Image: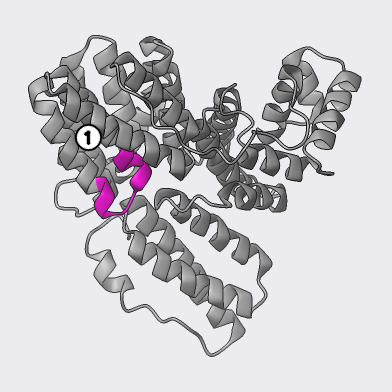
Amino acid sequence: MLGEEEAWDVVAGLPVDGTTAAERLDVARIHVNVGTGALIWGRYADAEEHLAVARRLAEAEQASRLQHNVRLEQANLAWNTGRWDGLAETSAALADADRDRPAHYLGSIRLLARLAAAAGRRRAAEEQFRQVLEESARLGAVDDTMEAAAALSRLWLADGNSRRALRITDEPMETVRRKGIWIWATDLVPARVEALLAAGDPAAAKRLVDQFARGLRGRTAPAPRAALAGCRALLLTAGEKAAAFDRAARAWSALPRPYDAMRARERQAEALIAHGRTEAGRELLAAQYEQLFRLGARGDADRVAQRLREHGAEVPRLWRGGRRGYGDQLSPRELDVVQLVVAGKTNREISRILAKSPATVDQQLRAAMRKLKVNSRTALAVKAVEAGVFAES
């Protein structure tokens, strides 16, 4: 039902309570589903409202599993709307609580993967997105494969591997085309378009953008439409791109979805520089560096800082909250182990991935826990993320 525009008029009149415990739980589940749909469409005010109703009812009835469902979607909402403070800790706690429910556990891992990618922790992000993609496909949750495939495509495209970036999006893209559910493609289509352009196939990129536009016709879905604006900008010449990416950034900001808006502004800045407006582009890049840094997207901020240096601009000096890490600095080998702990790997899996003995992994894990002054794997993962220990690795 939420795949159609008219459904939003219907859900506006949903009850917000019930006369019995069973009714209240039914109402709560309906509001969770509506909140999830609102997240996909990019209707974040609606999502916040419906998830708040669901959480109130779930807590009143002490329905712990339903509460976890709501908290996960509220964490997704926080990610999208740029409220990242404490989000790593929340997502790690949700992952621990939902290990016996694969779909919900993967939702928590996906959130951790987003944070890892934004922070520049490439290995952890790739491991986690791979896990989400493979397990979601195995469970038949095809809608959950879209974002993971798109994220992996962007990581590999950054390595210059357009063929691999295209291949990972083949199956999810075919699913979107076959089902005609273009609302799902907010992350997927832009990643695919970039990969096609990098592979030297602008005609295929344009055909895909045209399909995306037709698929969204008649729907005021803010997130997919903002993504469409970014896709259209990618197809333009350098002289046209700056204005087009400005439109995309404004569309993302209106949701609000600040991380995507900042990345669109970064592209706008690069387009300005390419078109000879160097000073304006450098100023805009510097502003994005500061905003990305303060949001917590340290990996993106570092990339923008490098581009500023390449363009002969000074990188703003921002306070990083003191020395990274807690206590003694982690060694490179301990960092490797901690990255895989953050990715949700067991000691046995870490041993296999890093080609180390289980005893060595255990020793390095304990050393990292001692240096970061924690006594559990979950606390280690949270503290490592929030301390920014991977930002320059």
- Name the residue rendered at 70%, 21% in the picture: 336
What segment is highlighted magenta in the picture? 252-262
The percent position of residue 27, horizontal first and vertical second, equals 49, 76
Does the magenta segment cover residue 256? yes
The percent position of residue 278, horizontal first and vertical second, equals 17, 22
Around disc 1, counting alpha carbons within 10 Å, would you say few (fewer than 14), some (14 to 19), or many (20 or more)?
Answer: many
Does the magenta segment cover residue 102? no
- Name the residue rendered at 59%, 80% in the picture: 22
Quadrant position of residue 59: bottom right
Query: Can you say whether 66 is above or below 119 in the image?
Result: below
- The quadrant of the rendering that contains the N terminus is bottom left
What residue did someone put label 1 on?
230
- Name the residue rendered at 39%, 17% in the picture: 157
Quadrant position of residue 121: top right
The percent position of residue 41, horizontal first and vertical second, equals 31, 53
- State left or right for residue 50 relative to residue 357: left
Quadrant position of residue 280: top left
Can residue 18 be seen at all in this image of the molecule? yes
Q: Main secondary structure of the magenta part?
A: helix
- State left or right for residue 68 relative to residue 215: right
Q: Secondary structure at mark 1?
A: helix
Query: Can you say whether 184 is above or below 163 in the image?
Result: below
Query: Can you say whether 34 is above or below 265 in the image?
Result: below
| Disc 1 residue type (three-letter) | Gly
Q: Nearer the viewer, residue 268 or 324?
A: 324
Toward the right, the furthest residue is 359
The percent position of residue 334, horizontal first and vertical second, equals 76, 23
- The quadrant of the rendering that contains the C terminus is top right
- State left or right for residue 304 relative to residue 387: left
- Name the residue rendered at 22%, 65% in the picture: 6
Q: Nearer the viewer, residue 175 or 53?
A: 53
Can residue 225 be seen at all in this image of the molecule? no
